[in-house]
Amino acid sequence: MLCAILYASWRKSLPSLRRDKAPGWPWRPGLTVALAFLLYGVARFILESLRDDNPFEIASLTISQLAAIAVFVVGIILFAIVMTTKPDARGGE
């Protein structure tokens, strides 16, 4: 499911790379990577909450859940960077 969402995001961002069509919001180069971090963090956190073999470490969260939260935060930071960076005249960022 994550692969399908990321593929759709990537395909949606392709027209923004062509010079003949202006980039539309929010589909910009780099968004798919940020979305991958966000979705993976959420999916990993949910899957780790279903597992029963890991002992709780901090605030009843496993180490994997804490790592998933960190990946999610990195995704938010990347998303903010992608959205605030203006593409240059050559079409790149």
Image (cartoon, grey):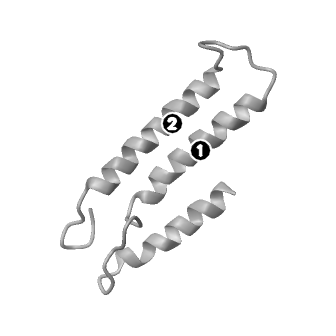
Farthest-out residue, bottom: 20
Total marks drawn?
Answer: 2
Q: Position of residue 87 (x, y in %)?
A: 24, 65
Q: Residue at x 64, y 19 (%)?
A: 61
Mark number, residue 60: none
Is 67 positioned to the left or the right of 1 in the image? left
Quadrant in which residue 51 is drawn: top right
Tell me the amino acid under the disc marked 1: Tyr
Q: Quadrant of residue 58?
A: top right
User: SS for tag 2?
Assistant: helix
Vertical side of 10 occupied by 74: above or below: above
Amino acid type for the residue under numbered disc 2: Val
Q: Residue at x 49, y 72 (%)?
A: 12
Quadrant placement of the N terminus: bottom right
Name the one closer to the observer, 4 or 61. 61
Instruction: Residue under label 1, please give it.
Output: 40
- Quadrant housing the C terminus: bottom left
Q: Which residue is mark 2?
A: 71
- Position above or below: 15 against 75: below
Question: Between marks 2 and 1, how big is the CA–CA gap?
Answer: 8 Å
